[in-house]
Amino acid sequence: MKTVIFDFDGTIADSFESVLTIFEEITKRPEKLTAEEIDILRGQSLRQIIKYLKIKKWQLPGMVFKAKKLIGVRITEIKTFPDMPETLKQLRNNGCGMYILSTNSADNIDRFLKKNGLDGYFAGISGDIGLQGKASALKKIIGRYKLDKSSCYYIGDEVRDILAAKKAGVTSVGVTWGFNDPAAIKDAKPDFIADSPKGLLKILG
């Protein structure tokens, strides 16, 4: 039986606009990011983004904490990506074990799933993961639930998700509908690339 571990924001939840608005609130930028700047950021790694936005490393924990609180206020307004509910339902019906791993809080994720009729689909939710700690978190999930690493797939919309999967020794699936653009996902060389939620069904069989 295949095990599917999902990233949350940008993979299941179409939260980019909300996250962008929250970022601008937290950083109190004098001007909003332009469409051109956003396109540039979509093609960069987390390290490059932090440098581009001139964010100090010591500022990150506080910013992430504030962001999770603010997104909690908006969480019930955020939608899933088109066809994602149907895809999750099919994967569940196919017998896949499903989990979520995210920097977002487990409470926010739980509220989102209930709002969108997806509660009960996932065997476990691991939230509050640090920006740089997804590989170790993946290993913890595998150990905690006694999963077979060879049957695990980690699905995410960012380069860091793909790198985390590789480091943890699980199959990586990069999706092109989230934060990082298709070129950046391709350059990260995931084991598989999905261009739509329904495309996951072909990969996961």
Image (cartoon, rainbow, N blue to C red):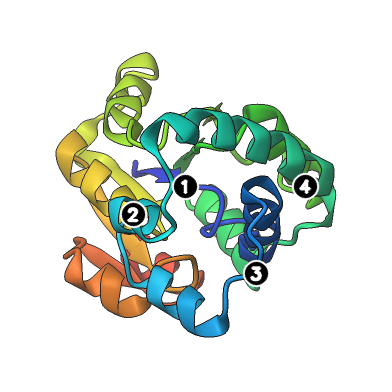
Q: Name the residue under label 1.
A: 7
Image coords of residue 1 (percent x, y): 34, 41
Residue at the extreme top = 144
**Closest to the observer, 57 or 84:** 57
Element marked by disc 1:
loop
Give whichever of discs 4 and 3 has the lower sequence position: 3
The amino acid beneath tag 2 is Lys
> Which residue is at 29% across, 50% downward?
47
Q: Is residue 199 left or right of residue 44?
A: right
- Dot placed on the residue nearer the N-terminal end, 1 or 2: 1
- Give the mark, 4 or 2, whose residue is nearer the N terminus: 2
Q: Earlier in the sequence, mark 3 or mark 2?
A: 3
Disc 1 marks a residue whose amino acid type is Asp
Q: Which mark is residue 51?
A: 2
Q: Distance between the residues labelled 3 and 1?
A: 30 Å
- As measured in the structure, the alpha-carbon distance from the residue carrying label 4 to the one carrying label 2 is 28 Å
Decide if residue 169 is on the left or right side of residue 68: left
Image coordinates of residue 132 in percent, x first then y, are 33, 35
Q: Which of marks 1 and 2 is in front?
A: 2
Q: According to the image, label 4 marks what residue?
A: 75
- Tell me, yes or no, whether the two marked residues, 1 and 2, touch with CB atoms within 8 Å: no
